[in-house]
Image: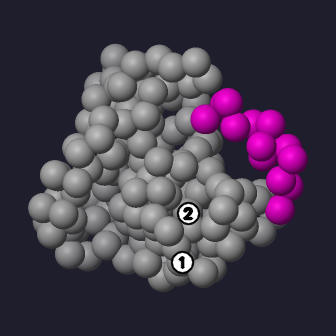
């Protein structure tokens, strides 16, 4: 973990491709996430300002409609001590339903869509996002407000946290 990190990305777990490459978000999901954030690949990987902390550190395997969920108990055991090592974090992105559920619990809306739509309700502590997986491209087409309303605000907050 990076003690100088000002942005923390909390996500479900590495995907198969990312785990094989031994680099988190080193796949189509990562390309899309960096685009949403408005950062370059170099900024994302070589900055001492962006940290990634998944709910599980290992690929959980393939399920019926995507990857299996992160293992239970992993985040509960490791996140608090890791968070304590990152005192400068100003912006925490909750990427995907598993991260949102783990961190927002019963404070989230009934659906992922409504939780993401109401992202201002969770600021400044958290910024909930749909997972950038290619499996969610249909969701993004059905919810154009995400690209027009949420992404610009995310980019603005990322730039503030990086400056």
Q: Position of residue 90 (x, y in %)?
A: 37, 77
Is residue 127 something one can see in this rendering? no
Work out whether residue 152 or residue 150 is closer to the camera in this orientation and state it: 150
Report the colour scheme: one colour
Whether residue 135 is in magenta: the answer is yes
Q: Position of residue 153 (x, y in %)?
A: 66, 72
Which residue appears at 45% of the width and 65% of the height?
Answer: 105
Q: Position of residue 132 (x, y in %)?
A: 61, 42
Q: Quadrant for the C terminus, please.
A: bottom left
Occupied quadrant, residue 76: bottom left
Which residue appears at 54% of the width and 48% of the height?
Answer: 96
Residue 128, disc: 2
* Vertical order, 83 against 163 (above or below): above
* Vertical order, 31 against 9 (above or below): above
Whether residue 114 is in magenta: the answer is no
> Relative to 70, is 159 on the left or the right?
right
Q: Position of residue 42 (x, y in %)?
A: 42, 45
Residue 54, disc: none
Span highlighted in magenta in the image: 133-145
For marks 2 and 1, the one nearer the N-term is 1
Main SS category, magenta section: helix
Which residue appears at 23% of the width and 45% of the height?
Answer: 73
The answer to whether marks 2 and 1 mark residues whose Cβ atoms lie closer than 8 Å is yes
* Vertical order, 25 against 46 (above or below): above
Residue receiving disc 1 = 122
> Relative to 49, is 97 on the left or the right?
right
Work out whether residue 9 or residue 58 is closer to the camera in this orientation and state it: 58
Q: Quadrant for the N terminus, please.
A: bottom left
């Amino acid at each position: 973990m990076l003690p100088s990190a000002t942005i923390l990305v909390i996500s479900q777990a590495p995907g198969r491709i990312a785990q094989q490459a031994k680099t988190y978000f080193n796949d189509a999901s990562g390309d899309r996430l960096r685009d949403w954030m408005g950062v370059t690949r170099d900024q994302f990987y070589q900055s001492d300002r962006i940290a990634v902390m998944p709910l599980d550190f290992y690929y959980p395997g393939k399920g019926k409609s995507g990857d299996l969920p992160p293992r239970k108990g992993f985040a509960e055991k490791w996140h608090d001590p890791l968070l304590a090592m990152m005192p400068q974090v100003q912006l925490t992105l909750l990427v995907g339903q598993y991260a949102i559920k783990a961190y927002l619990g019963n404070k989230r809306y009934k659906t992922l869509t409504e939780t993401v739509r109401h992202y201002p309700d969770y600021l400044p502590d958290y910024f909930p996002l749909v997972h950038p997986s290619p499996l969610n491209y249909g969701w993004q087409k059905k919810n154009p407000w995400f690209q027009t309303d949420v992404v610009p605000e995310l980019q603005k907050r990322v730039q503030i946290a990086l400056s």
